[in-house]
Amino acid sequence: MVKPVFLIFFICLAFCTAASAAGPLFDDDSLISMQLIGDFSNLLKEIDKEKSYPAKLIYSTETGSVEIPVKLQVRGNARLEHCRVPGLRVIFPKSGVEGLFIDQRKLKLVTQCRQKSDQYKQYLLQEYLIYRMYAQLTVHSFKSRLVTVDFQDSGKKSQQWSNFAFFIEDKKRMATRLGATVVEKPMVKRSQLAPKETNLVSVFQYMIGNTDYSMLKGEGEEACCHNLRLLDKGEGYIPVPYDFDFAGLINPGYAAPAASLGIKKVTQRLYRGFCGGNDHLPDNLALVLTNKSMLYAIIDGGKVNERTVKKMHRYLDGFYKTIDDPKRLDKNIAQKCRPKPQPKK
């Protein structure tokens, strides 16, 4: 018989190992204040995702300020085209970093697309809440951390502004935390995906009204999959979604669905799950029903304004009305699944 003290030790060891793999940056969800000082005069005009700009990241602790030399790269596709402030990748030194960012190497920083816009502030905060909502449903999710950033331009214009932003956990760090490896393939087959986890992604994307993703291939020359990362734990590839800014739950003015989907606006829900996953619909729908109050609480406890909270509630209400009605559930979800393509004759 295992003694209680040893059982507690092993449980703690497993939990602490998983937590430490993410790093102290993602240990809680309290707001972090920081500064980024760099040549934003040129960086904000950059389109080369491989070009790096030296910068300083500064944050405060109880014992004083911590300054880290970092490099910044622009990232994203759609945001590079229409955003005044593109998404950023923050690259940390290989050694010598302690404290909040210890052992971090590369992190995505989701920024507010336009500096002086309350509407874009709401968009960003809503996307952050969606990351937290998905993390409420499954451990197979990216951790995130909200920050306020004072951007200070060291370039010619010497501009300065402050906005919310949030960090997203590195995919390799996430895989390590979950005891998995990252799948790097241009395409995968449906049969290679873990059915239950894949179906949960489909249910969640339908709930938030997001169609801007692919389960089977990457965008252009990128690795599979579009706005998803695949994890391998030995029992089928587990999809982990990210980039929710085109979701109907947010409904940003710049978002439009792909013409091939047959819907006119992103607020129109379209179920894109595979028919092979319908056996897992009852369990996954039960999961989102069980967590309903928690998902609403995440929204209520966020930093979005009251108007945005009400809008998000109304949109989620529509989803829960659908899954509470057997006829609507069958018509809008179960029967809308994507059948396996028939082989060409």
Image (cartoon, rainbow, N blue to C red):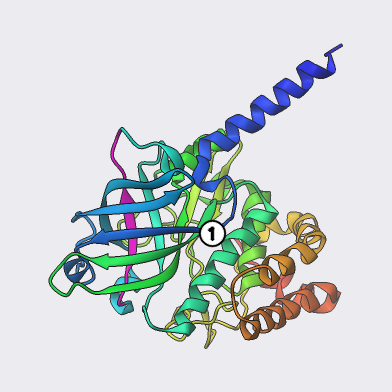
Q: Nearer the viewer, residue 21 or 200?
A: 21
Q: Indicate the position of residue 112 as horizontal and vertical percent values.
A: 41, 72
SS type, badge 1: loop
The residue segment tinted magenta is 84-95
Q: What amino acid type should be assigned to the residue bearing mark 1?
A: Leu
Q: Position of residue 66 (x, y in %)?
A: 36, 46
276 lies above or below 257: above
**Residue drawn at (78%, 74%) of the image:** 320
Q: Is residue 102 above or below residue 82?
A: above
For residue 260, side relative to residue 278 (left or right): left
| Residue hosting label 1 | 31
Residue 340: quarter of image: bottom right
Give whichever of 326, 156 is nearer the camera.
Answer: 156
Work out whether residue 122 or residue 258 is closer to the camera in this orientation and state it: 122
Work out whether residue 256 can be spotted: no
Q: Nearer the viewer, residue 24 or 341?
A: 24
In the figure, is residue 19 to the left or right of 286?
Answer: left
**Is residue 88 part of the magenta span, yes or no?**
yes
- Image-based side of 132 in relation to 12, left or right: left
